[in-house]
């Protein structure tokens, strides 16, 4: 490819989140004209300051309201590309249907009506083996997007650095690193927000990423929770204690709450939380071969340069 890539007009929904923010900044770095769709919230207001200083336009609205998507986010403008970084926070059935499916469907309909040509969706690699409500909601929208007639790029990242960093502070304080089973039940190729954002921005430029489902991980070998603990120990210069939790504990919680989920929203949510925890404790975030029912690290594409080790080192510097 010769010359600089063509600048596109891009609308990013879900720009209030950490990945959405990184995507907006990556698009600007690549020379695109960017409008960030933000929630009417304190986080949205904070992002507005960041984006305006970086030369992005900002619009506020509610993705759960079709009229707001059309009037507030699109507002009569024509965008070449629409990027959705929307995702439910809890993963419960109600939130998944409202955000992972319906909010994205609202955006897709508005994008088609506004004449957009390309829709990039941030999905998740775990939808390969759907056992949870949010996975089914994401798959339902993926199918709708594929059938829409727009050029699509469905990006399915592996684990994020943030999702693997929740125990850093407790380990620094001398508390044990919690693993399920023997700590080797799952593996992933985590990718940083920055590298993922660069990959998503590249979906505009590279035709090989058009009309594709794109699993993507970060650089290096697949790592287990035990590897994560060992990395922290190496950086801290001491052995990190482990606390091994039986996987059956989550199964027991899920069964216990499931008895009441038909009559109680509270029980339904708790049961789904337990099922989500069990899923992530037992399923790898790598490309899954449905014929062999195995996860394959070698078949999981890698992108970027940021490593989890470097991320942990940065976090440890801030906790000293």
Image (cartoon, helix red, strand yellow):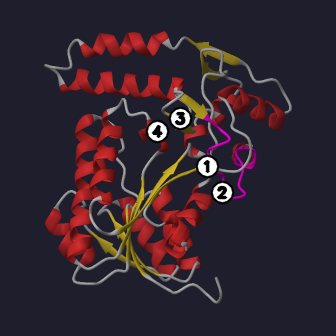
Q: Is residue 282 visible?
A: yes
Which residue of the protein is positioned furthest toward the front in this rendering? 291
Q: Earlier in the sequence, mark 4 or mark 3?
A: 4
- Give the quadrant of the C terminus: top right
Quadrant of the image containing the N terminus: bottom right
Can residue 25 be seen in this snapshot? no
Q: Nearer the viewer, residue 131 or 262?
A: 131
Question: Circle 1 is placed at which residue position?
Answer: 217
Relative to 214, is 140 above or below?
A: above
Q: Residue at x 45, y 46 (%)?
A: 124
Q: What is the CA distance from the residue labelled 4 to the residue labelled 3?
A: 12 Å
Q: Which mark is residue 303?
A: 2
Q: Disc 1 or 2, which lies upstream in sequence?
A: 1
Specify which label sits upstream in the sequence, 1 or 4. 4
Name the residue rendered at 37%, 13% in the picture.
Answer: 253
Which disc is residue 126 wearing? 4
Please name the residue shown 50% across and 30% down the image: 291
Q: CA distance from mark 1 to mark 4?
A: 12 Å
Provide the residue span drawn in magenta. 296-314
Relative to 139, is 54 on the left or the right? right
Q: Nearer the viewer, residue 16 or 169?
A: 16
> Secondary structure beneath disc 3?
strand
């Amino acid at each position: 490819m010769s010359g600089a890539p063509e600048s596109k007009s891009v609308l990013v929904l879900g720009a209030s989140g950490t990945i959405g923010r990184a995507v907006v900044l990556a698009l600007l770095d690549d020379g695109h004209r960017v409008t960030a769709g933000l929630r009417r919230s304190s986080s949205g207001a904070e992002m507005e300051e960041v984006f305006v200083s970086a030369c992005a336009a900002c619009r506020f609205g509610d993705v759960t309201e079709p009229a707001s998507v059309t009037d507030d986010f699109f507002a009569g403008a024509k965008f070449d590309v629409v990027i959705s970084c929307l995702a439910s926070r809890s993963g419960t059935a109600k939130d998944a249907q409202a955000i992972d499916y319906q909010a994205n469907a609202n955006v897709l309909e508005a994008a088609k009506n506004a004449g957009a040509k390309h829709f990039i969706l941030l999905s998740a690699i775990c939808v390969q083996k759907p056992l949870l409500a949010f996975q089914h909601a994401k798959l339902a929208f993926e199918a709708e997007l594929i059938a829409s007639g727009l050029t699509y790029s469905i990006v399915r990242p592996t684990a994020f650095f943030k999702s693997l960093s929740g125990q850093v502070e407790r380990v620094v304080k001398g508390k044990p690193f919690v693993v399920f089973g023997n700590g080797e039940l799952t593996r992933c190729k985590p990718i940083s927000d920055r590298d993922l954002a660069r990959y998503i921005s590249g979906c505009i430029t590279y035709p090989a990423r058009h009309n594709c489902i794109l699993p993507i991980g970060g650089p290096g070998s697949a790592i287990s929770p035990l590897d994560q603990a060992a990395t922290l120990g190496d950086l801290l210069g001491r052995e990190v204690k482990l606390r091994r939790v039986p996987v059956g504990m989550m199964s027991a919680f899920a069964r216990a709450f499931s008895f009441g989920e038909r009559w109680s929203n509270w029980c339904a949510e708790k049961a789904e939380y337990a099922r989500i925890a069990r899923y992530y404790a037992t399923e790898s975030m790598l490309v899954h071969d449905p014929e062999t029912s195995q996860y394959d690290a070698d078949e999981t594409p890698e992108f970027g340069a940021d490593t989890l080790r470097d991320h942990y080192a940065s976090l440890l510097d801030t906790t000293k």
